[in-house]
Amino acid sequence: MPSARYKMSSLKISFCLLVFGIFFIFFPNTSFAETTAYRSASTVSTDNIAGSNYPYTNLSNCSATDGLTCDRPLASGYGNLYFRNFGDFGIPDGSIITSLRIRVTGKTHVPVLALFTGLSRIGSSPYPLFYESCQSLSDRWRMYALNSTTIKVYNVTTPTTNGYLAICLSPSNIKTSNFIFNIHFSHSSAWSSNIDNFEIAFDYTPPAAPYSPQPFLDLPWDYEAKGQTFADAALAISSYFDHEYPLLSSGLSEPNESSSTIVKYKENKRIDDFYSSHDGYDWAKGAKVNLGDPVLAAAAGTAEYVNSCAPCGNMILIDHENGYQTRYLHLQKDGLIVSTPGIKMHVNSRQQIGKVGATGNVLPPGNAGAHIHFGVFEDKNNDGNFNDNVPDGVTDPFGWQASEPDPWESYSFFFNGLSKTGNKSYYLWKKSLGETSATLSPSGGNLNSGHYFFNFFSNAVSQDTSIQLTPEPIISPSNILSSIGPTLLAIAQDQFGNYVTNFLNPFTLIVDFANFDLSHFDQSTLSIYSSQDGVSWTKEPTIIDFTNQKASATFSHFTHFALMANRLDTTAPSTTASLSGNKGKDNWFNSDVTLSFDAQDNQGGLGVDYTLYRINEGSWNSFASAIIATEEGHFKYNFYSVDKDENTEDIKSIEFDIDKTPPVLSINADPLILWPPNGKFVPVEISGDILELHLANKTFNIIDEYNINMPVINDFGDIIFLQALRKGNDFDGRRYIINLEAVDLAGNKSNVQTEVIVPHDQSKK
């Protein structure tokens, strides 16, 4: 039989295991706070307020615990000592500040109570630096421990998880040093203070390991069938996601100062771009995306059709059932995987869902603006409805690749009466852009990324050096100069993380351009360029091997690199319109009208590709042969042409009217019979009407069978005088014929007349 002692030991062990199991079950993810190192203020100041003549002295002595002190002599009145700019505490972004630790080293002689410490955010003019009290009455931090004739240490730890103290010591205020401490005392009796050091530290709970979704997307067209790599296609971007204000789908406006700039995914810096506020990516001819090409599902999911967004044109949405939705805009009407709103259909990855089109708002308008607009939205609140996360759920599938914070992720705004915050972007493409990370040793070596190949000779570096090669989007530094394929960012760092910008021995850079079409470029200008900032580019001495289709240059520095050349054609074509038909005034016609367009490219250009036109703000059409207008009405034709290097003419217009209907006329005279024939002149009033909206002119004339000069009629309502006289042998009476002729702007004519008679016999009137 087991002893009681053994039973008790077993019971203790079982109890301990039970407690441990309970703790393990209920607290598996407990994260304990960490504490920063104590830091002293780099800026110490004092003041002389309320009539005190005794501020602190020796201010440089109270930023280190070394026995040297800031001193206030024995005197009455106020005395303040201020501490700010404590530097970087190294608190990771996303941490929760749980406690403030204060450690003050020094001694004081005070008549009552003790010195106390206060906290404020830093005030701006007209307020003083220390303008508020961030602590509650229970947190006045009275430093009784310093009431001594020898140096002592005051320590206190105060929670900062709620209240005004938490606001003042928010992570952003700590990071930007937007806070200031003071040591304060005032009394009518004399007191003194000697402060050796004022230090603070923070307890914080670091953020959980960052969430990163599994990449799942591919590009929404068959780039491989066009001979492209993923990087070549993906980086041939026409329009970028704007990381500052991607608000396009919401209709919200951005500030005026940002209305013509964007922030790309590589750097938190505004660059000029008219397509600001864009919330997705556009790919067009530069990526070999052409009108009518198949548009493919970027990943499997449930597709539906939306036609309620006029600027979007025909749009397909795909819910990928992982919290993300992709959107495909401007599709052609024909070829849609589903074309009835509200109907949903499962699609596989890379399945055709539509065709590249130009519906909705595209620029340039019409088929010349055909492209794929591709957008990604996250269901941030996980309610299955992506529309309530527009625009705050919009995300960049390239992620945010800059070292600075993403402005969109922290942007706060109100939309539909709700407070919203932007979204975090992740790299969601399944394929890499071809980044290369490697270590270069002093013995040299070869590295490549995409079309760029580096040959490092021995002793280019004196120690192992980290090399990072990153393909970047195509660029056009000017209207003439353009890169051929993606550009490249090359970065080198030594073992301590210092950037290596210059090498001890030169290296050779070779760019392979075999897969690129050079027909649009002046090949005599082909050269490798370098840039320190990706904005200003320098043409480097380059050897061009057209046989092997390679360009090479020698460098001693790392930088941005690009293979570039001048475009052969940078001038848009010019189009004239001609009209033929029976023409009246201006562009009025009274017949069918034949409209033709004649487009001419500049001398030495690549030639006109196509001409587009539309009628009365309708849809755009390609011009193939003469257009015949037969209906009556007003016609406005917009038109422009595009050459074979995508130089696009400004939109022109021509207007004309067709009117085949003559004016409708009526005319009356009062009286119509003049009697008696006594030779007197009788007043006759002319009246009538002309039913014609576009009258050019009207003419009245009077024909007298006796060929006597007649009065002039200018308009309806005129009164003329006709003589009541006829010849005795004029048995049918004297006839005055009053004639009206009207002509409209198209040249249509009408005539009408009335008669005034002086009868031979009144009985026959």
Image (spheres, rainbow, N blue to C red):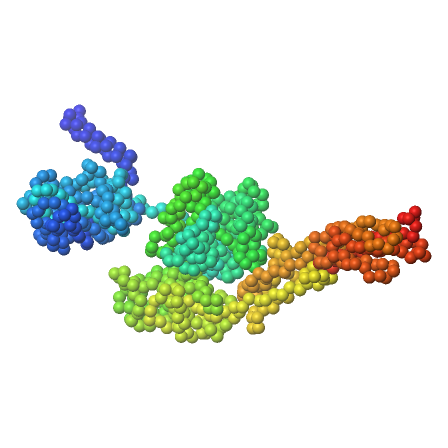
Q: Which of 643 and 187 lies nearest the eye of the viewer? A: 187
**Could you tell me which quadrant the N terminus lies in?**
top left
Does 334 sit left or right of 297 as displayed? right
> Taking 683 as reference, is 288 left or right?
left
Looking at the picture, tell me which residue is in the foreground, 340 or 80.
80
The answer to whether residue 628 is seen in the rendering is: no
What residue do we see at 43% from left, 40% from top?
A: 417
Taking the view exactly as shown, the residue that stands out farthest to the left is 149
Q: Which percent across, then down, holds residue 617?
A: 61, 54
| Image coordinates for residue 612, horizontal then vertical, percent | 61, 60
Which residue lies at the image location 39% right of the left edge and 58% below the top edge? 270
Identity of the residue drawn at 58% across and 43% down: 340
> What is the x, y in percent for residue 673?
85, 50
**In the rendered image, the vertical position of residue 386 relative to residue 485, given as above or below:** above
Residue 728 falls in which quadrant of the image? bottom right
Left/right placement of residue 82 relative to residue 209 reads: left
Seen in the image, is 4 located left or right of residue 392? left
Q: Nearer the viewer, residue 224 or 107?
A: 107
Residue 4 in view here: yes
Instruction: State the count of labels.
Output: 0
Q: Residue at x 71, y 63 (%)?
A: 580
Q: Hey, which quadrant is residue 662 in on the image?
A: bottom right
Front residue of 61 and 371: 61
The image quadrant that residue 506 belongs to is bottom left
Q: Position of residue 116 (x, y in %)?
A: 15, 42
Q: Is residue 470 above or below residue 29?
A: below
